[in-house]
Image (cartoon, rainbow, N blue to C red):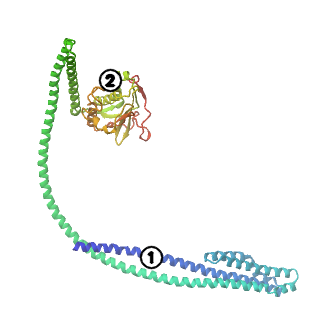
Amino acid sequence: MRRALQQRSQRFIIWLGLLPLILAFVSYRTSSSHIASVQATFSTDQFIRRLDELFSAVQDAETGQRGYLLTGDDQYLRPFASAQKRLPARVAEVEALAARNNVPAGKMRRIRALVEMKMAELEEVLDLVRAGGRAAALKEVETNRGDQYMSELRSAIDGIKSEQNRELEMRWEAQQRSQLRLDAVLGIGIVIGFLLLSLAYRFNVLYARERDEAEARIQRLNESLELRVQERTSNLEARTRELEQRTAELQRSNADLTQFAYIASHDLQEPLRMVGSYMGLLARRYQGQLDETADRYIQFATDGAARMQTLIADLLTYSRAGTQAIEKKPVPFEQVVTSAVRNLEIAIRENSAEIHYGNLPLVDGDESKLVQVMQNLIGNAIKFHKPGVTPVIEINAKHVDHEWLFSVADNGIGFEPRYCDRIFQVFQRLHSVGRYPGNGIGLAICRRIIEHHGGKLWADSEPEVGSTFFFTLPIATEDTSNQSHLSMGEGGEYPEPASHVGISATI
């Protein structure tokens, strides 16, 4: 019950803790709006003052011109000259402020035109006075054209000022509302802050109480766990001793089985040799004296004995491949391939086989066992070649995940991908007996050797295209980072292989 209450309280505090974020967001938006409104108010006020200053400047110019007309004193022309010099800048400033305060551009063009027309009218009267036509100048003034310009300018400016004053009033009301919202947000934030502090204190007290109770429970559990660990340790030690005894018995049993298989194979070979020898004597001594059926039976028996001897020899090889110790040492794999090619010299010459391989790396393994693997893979590639097509075998290696990945690819007859696992089983053949030599145990031996080296062996093939056998081997324990004969090119790709056609380049 207490835990459920605590969980609900924690969820409540979490949701309550979100309120300051919401309030901060609302406060930010409100203050931003308030600041923008204040800035707009300042801009509007400045715009109104600049309008007044613009109108005053035009009035000063008119007053100076009138004083000059009445007195003829050039001193009265100073306000006119000053206004004439500064009015373009004042008009441009007013137009910029008008654009900022959303005043229609047409109204500002009207004001600019009225100012220019008024200044032109004042300049025209002064030109008449300077030309000696004081009467003409007074006559021009009496037309009231200048007063009409001033009246229209005053009306245009007053209209804009009236609109801007209304905007000021609206912004002032908006500022008051935003200020009230800010005050409300701050008040709520203060209340929530005090509430959070109170809840934090309450939960701190509850946490301290729960912590003490939890530490007491943990202490009790630790004591119980120590007792259980001691019991389990005793049981584990007893089971370990039992497992060691069983392991020792299993090792003795494996050794006995290996010795039995070796002895049994040798004992089987002796009677088989005797059967084969006597059947050979029968065939030589009585050939042609018996009927054709007897000769065929004798031939069957002789072939069967020979095949049985080959099977026993292959079984011995398979048994040794899984039981004999592997003497690992750094071995140049190019040397392994060279030895395998030398052992297959006759088959290579008879089939005009081409073997291509580049600079191969240094591996950690048993050289004689690896020669056996390569001899089997290359021999199979030559054996299962397509009739009338020169066998071509390519051997490559590349560095993958802290080990070397080798590939032996050929252009032979290939096989269906569904047989990729079957070919590595003992005595599993994909072709009928007699069509190709061998008992179907070579690849099983190869896989056993590679696995005892800590690697894997698998195949990929396509009928009538060829097969590729892949296997991995550990990198030599020596520092191979600076070897010049690594097979991996830039980016982990295969290098361009060197050509070893037939055996001419290796023997």
Query: Horizontally, is 252 left or right of 490 in the view?
Result: left
Location of residue 74 in the rendering, given as x and y in whole percent from the top left corner: 81, 82
Nearest the viewer among 40 and 398 is 398
Nearest the viewer among 271 and 91 is 271
Callout 2 crowding tier (Cα within 10 Å): few <14, some 14–19, many ≥20: some
- Residue 479 in sight from this viewpoint: no
The image quarter containing residue 269 is: top left
Nearest the viewer among 325 and 442 is 442
Residue position for label 1: 26
Disc 1 on helix, strand or loop?
A: helix
Amino acid type, mark 1: Val
Nearest the viewer among 310 and 322 is 310
Query: Horizontally, is 156 left or right of 397 in the view?
Result: right
Foreground label between 2 and 1: 2
Location of residue 446 in the rendering, given as x and y in whole percent from the top left corner: 28, 33
The numbered disc on residue 395 is none
**What residue lies at 27% left-to-right and 30% top-to-bottom?**
442
Disc 2 on helix, strand or loop?
A: helix
Location of residue 104 in the rendering, given as x and y in whole percent from the top left corner: 65, 77
Location of residue 322 in the rendering, given as x and y in whole percent from the top left corner: 22, 34
In the figure, 302 relative to 28: above or below? Answer: above
Residue position for label 2: 343
Amino acid type, mark 2: Asn
Query: Horizontally, is 319 left or right of 497 in the view?
Result: left
Quarter placement of the N terminus: bottom left
The image quarter containing residue 390 is: top left
User: Which tag, 2 or 1, sits closer to the chain's start?
Assistant: 1
The image quarter containing residue 116 is: bottom right
Quarter placement of the C terminus: top left
Callout 1 crowding tier (Cα within 10 Å): few <14, some 14–19, many ≥20: some
